[in-house]
Amino acid sequence: MTDQNVFQHHLPQSLKNIIGDATWERTFEGYSGTHVFRLSSGNYLKIAPMDFYNSLLPEKERLVWLQGKLPVPQVLGFDHDSRHHYLLISEMSGVPTHDRQFENQQDGLISALAAGLRMMHSVDIRDCPFDQRLQVTIKEARRRLENKWVDAEDFDDERQGRTAQSAFDQLLRTRPKTEDVVFTHGDYCLPNVFIDPQTWAVTGFIDWGRAGIADRYQDLALAARSLVYNFGDAGVEQLFKQYGLDTIDHDKIAYYKLLDEFF
């Protein structure tokens, strides 16, 4: 029996009632045992081990809170069995911004990415229950280090050959003295941002498990890294300018890239 058949067999009844006889197509399988299936209904089913450090409960909670605040998927169902969490979400309209059709349309792409950042960072944080400031994320980074969940072989090129411990020591040593807090996505990379390719309007954002109150550079750093990875570094300065930065804190850019090695 394949993994897909196993999941279908053990799917909680509450989700079976919603999914019905829709067919499943796997779109992602992570090293941690996380799976994403696109259903013939157009919806998506995410499955992750309950004991995995990135369980789906944080994402579900954030999606519920974000309804009406930002264009995000709707939570259609959430349940668990003895081993897994199951999150059923609606499909996002538009095209993810890492799509190759945008390779020669960098001006429009960067404008859309900057607009998405401004949209997200304008969310009112006064009643936000999700704290992702450094006092929280560094503690979580330490937990992941101690549990040997940090894969040093997957570090960015500039940290290849480093140990996870040495990277963590640097994280403590270079911690910024201040945080300019806004509501952040936490993993603002191009596959998580959807746009209308005709109008360049942002149509939605996905993968919300790390969202919350944090320094705006959490998103700026990962947006810049993702832009370079997908389309080269020519547009990074333009991204920051269109976002609205008069000056760029390159130390914070470097710091939040380092922090991301633990997540």
Image: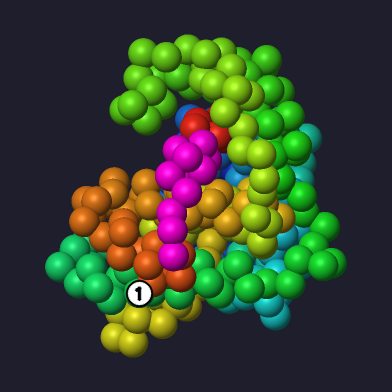
Which of the image's four quarters has the C terminus? top right
Q: Which residue is mark 1?
A: 111
Residue 34: where, in percent of width, then height? Answer: 55, 39
Q: Residue 224: say if magenta.
A: no
Residue 139: where, in percent of width, then height? Answer: 73, 29
Residue in the image at 53% along x and 72% along y: 118
In the image, is 239 to the left or to the right of 166?
left
Which residue is more in the foreground, 122 or 190? 122
Colour setup of the view: rainbow
Q: What is the span of residues highlighted in magenta in the rendered image?
A: 246-256
Can residue 176 be seen at all in this image of the molecule? yes
Magenta stretch, main secondary structure class = helix
Residue in the image at 62% along x and 32% along y: 175
Q: Is residue 195 above or below residue 221?
A: below
In the image, is 245 to the left or to the right of 215?
left
Residue in the image at 56% along x and 13% along y: 165
Q: Is residue 62 above or below residue 133?
A: below
Residue in the image at 38% along x and 23% along y: 159
Q: Secondary structure at mark 1?
A: helix
Residue at far bottom of view: 199
Which residue is more in the foreground, 48 or 114? 114
Q: Amino acid at mark 1?
A: Ser
Residue at far front of view: 247
In the image, is 151 to the left or to the right of 55?
left
